[in-house]
Image (cartoon, rainbow, N blue to C red):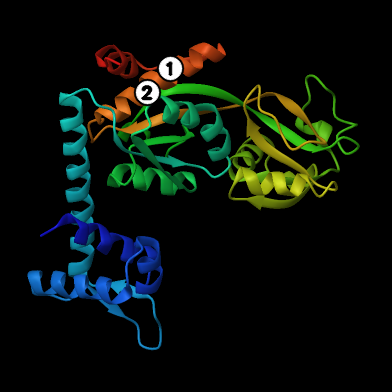
Amino acid sequence: MDTEYYRNFMAMVDAGNMTSAAEYLHITQPTLSKQLQLLEKRFETKLVVVARGRRRLHLTEAGEIFYQRAKEICALEDLAGDEMATATQEVRGTLRFSISPGRSPRFIQRVLAGFHKEYPNVRFELKEGITSVQQEDLLAGETDLGVCHTTFPQPEQFEFLFTRAETLTVVGAKDLLRQVPMQGARFSDLGGMAIAASGSADAILRQEIGDPQTLFQLVAVCTTKASALAWARTENVAALIPAEEEEEFWPGLDSRKLSGVTLKKAIVRPRNRPLSHTAQVFLHYYASVLKAEKVDASVSANADDTLASVSV
């Protein structure tokens, strides 16, 4: 059976209903419904059910099994295509990333735009989500590489190829940050301030000082860095986020880096799956970007081996 049916089935499950999936796939709903019927006939079992009075789809037990196997089959097909391209040294196919929403714009501008210019036959899928979702997608084979924090719940299942430091940073209106020192700022310098923290920043706060409300007013804890920064644009609230040394923020906002509080972000790959040729070429390109920017980043031995094996 054509793996297009498998891919469309996965899209339908991910979307949660036929209508949304058909719109995403740019096919008609009857066509998608017919494909589902053919799959259920092929395997002689019901794969999905629709709750009475609702349009949302739910997988049966057999559907859960088929969904997981469909992902594996399609991932193998993608890998085979990449390996065929490797035989001719052609760089093409799809490169899929797990990434937090707050990192996407900068990653596109700094890295993907240039890579696309050099390798126009590669297309990209950026699946945005929190750390736990990124981990699940990488292990399930739904994405190839992650751009995320190194604080994974199961770090032994991953290889952290490039690691860069980030600093916990407070961002807000200039008048709001006037009391915070330009250099060597500490949590105590934020006393009484209204703060919106990203999820990772909130975790550090609780680790370092316990209950943040004893020091300042924690107005919001945001899943994404972008949401925390949206609070900073209200002028009355400052955002507390991880940021790179050279990162820039919305015009009119000021920033202060907190002394002694650092995080690490990395390019991550799952250990349970080989890298495609396209992914290897991307890592080689990413290393060249870091070198051109003269960024201080640690590189794992596995990344060194990967880069040494790539001819571009």
Check the image and report above or below for 217 versus 149: below
Q: Secondary structure at mark 1?
A: helix
The image quadrant of residue 152 is top left
Task: Give how far apart the Cα atoms at labels 1 and 2 are.
Answer: 6 Å
Q: Position of residue 135 (x, y in %)?
A: 38, 43
* Residue 62, above or below 158: below
- Viewer-closest of 111 and 61: 111
Which quadrant would the N terminus be assigned to in this image? Answer: bottom left
Which quadrant of the view contains residue 183? top right
Determine which quarter of the picture holds residue 204.
top right
The structure residue drawn at horizontal position 35% and vertical position 83%, both measured from the top left corner, is 51
- Proximity of marks 1 and 2: CB atoms separated by less than 8 Å: yes
State the quadrant of the C terminus. Answer: top left
Would you name the residue on which mark 1 appears? 287
Q: Secondary structure at mark 2?
A: helix
Residue 109 is left or right of residue 194, and the answer is: left
Return the residue at label 2: 283
Residue at 22% of width from left, 42% of height from top? 78
Residue at the extreme bottom: 53
Task: Return the mark for residue 119.
Answer: none
Q: Position of residue 63 (x, y in %)?
A: 21, 67
**Residue found 79% across the figure and 42% down from its top:** 215
Q: Position of residue 298 (x, y in %)?
A: 46, 15
Neighbor class of circle 2 (other Cα within 10 Å; few <14, some 14-19, many 20+) is many
Q: Nearer the viewer, residue 248 or 195?
A: 248
Amino acid, disc 2: Leu
Q: Amino acid at mark 1?
A: Ala
